[in-house]
Amino acid sequence: MPDNPIFVTRPSLPSLEDFVSSLEQIWNSKFLTNGGPFHQELEEKLVNYLGVPYVSLASNGDAALLTVLKSMDLSGEVITTPYSFVSTTHSILWNGLTPVFVDVDPSSGNMDTSKIEDAITDKTAAILAVHCYGFPCDVGAIETIAKKHGLKVIYDAAHAFGVKCHCGKSVLNHGDASILSFHATKVFNTLEGGAIISHTKTQKDHIDLIKNFGIAGQEDIPFHGLNAKMSEVNAAFGLLQLNHIDKVIEKRKSVSDLYCSLLNDIEGVTCLNETAAGDQHNYSYFPVIIGDNYKHTRDDLFDLLKSHNIMSRKYFYPLLSNIQTYQNYPTATVGNLPHANNLASRVLCLPIYEDLKHDDVRRICEVIAK
Ligand SMILES: Cc1ncc(COP(=O)(O)O)c(C=O)c1O
């Protein structure tokens, strides 16, 4: 195989010495979980860094989704996107709700808000939208529809850490709540982890109750919750990550900008990140759309890159509406979701991470251009 492998992603890490020092504090305090000092500090620091009212840390993004949906006490149908990771729709099912798919906007991969009202029935309880690749959804349109029909809005913002809309405010301030993922592959990682963003102290307290099994006190368990708590080790790791997150995003931006400039002239290759201008993006992914006028299909390009020891990712593929669990839902048809099906067959996410060398970006682009 030619050259060293280039992975599709590599995690950013704090210095090992700093982490060992945090571990020593945990060893000394013997406080391992249940909202210890590192957990409290990370929640406070994230409130400030993200510019949001309340943060509840979680063990992962999936548990955050399960918890936030549970906190809303919903029944019936939830309108959502098929162009996402399985966690989005699985969390709807785990809460005893029914996912209803609407198509996406082909320029961003986000839910096409002009399709939402047609999907509303007398059973619709909420909209669960995804800020796909960290690109903000049309939050204004979603809010207007939700208000008109009395629906809750939850944003799966797993990809949107640090993203701001062009108003300069965090995208996480929209909707009734948002969730983040701090998985190892994400821009900001705590090894595994996640968070729920809420708007009031009452809402945060309720979410914190649910993520702690529904236990309010030793003899007081008013709710059936789950264990979605983040440990002290993950929180301590996250605090160290926060110290260098701006640099991480800056370096990702320089990789993304270089890709855009090198791929610009290649016929049939469209860089989705170019459309993010105006928002403060986090460059969490580098998705490209492979058009008919490119000389290979997306799948052939994936194989070609692999033959050069370059890992890319068909993300999101397969489409959620086409996997066994959802394929028989009435709204899962190709006819209902033409843009999502098209994108799922054309998008390739190219390698992007903090330490990706610019020479490697050039090597990737040469293979694509050849
Ligand atoms: C859109 C989306 N939602 C939810 C999740 C679940 O997050 P986690 O892996 O932290 O459980 C992911 C993870 O990749 C995701 O991409």
Image: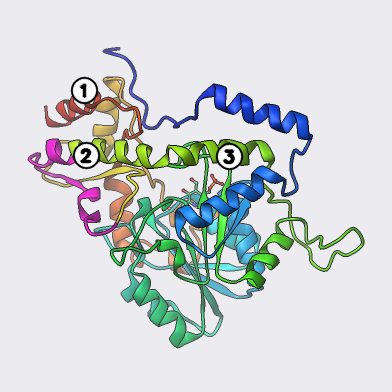
Q: Is residue 176 toward the left or the right of residue 303 in the image?
A: right
Sequence-first disc among 3 and 2: 3
Q: CA distance from mark 2 to mark 1?
A: 25 Å
Give the residues in magenta: 260-279
Q: Can you tell which quarter of the image residue 143 is in?
A: bottom left
Q: Is residue 23 toward the left or the right of residue 334 in the image?
A: right
* Residue 324 in view (yes/no): no
Res 192 label = 3
Q: Give amino acid for label 3.
A: Glu
> Could you tell me if the residues under marks 3 and 2 are in contact, i.e. CB atoms within 8 Å?
no
Determine if the C-beta at disc 3 is less than 8 A from ligand 1.
Answer: yes
Residue, disc 1: 359
Q: Give amino acid for label 1.
A: Asp
Res 297 label = 2
Sequence-first disc among 3 and 1: 3
Instruction: Report helix, strand or loop for mark 3.
Output: loop
Does the magenta-highlighted stretch encompass residue 177? no
Q: Residue at x 56, y 50 (%)?
A: 61
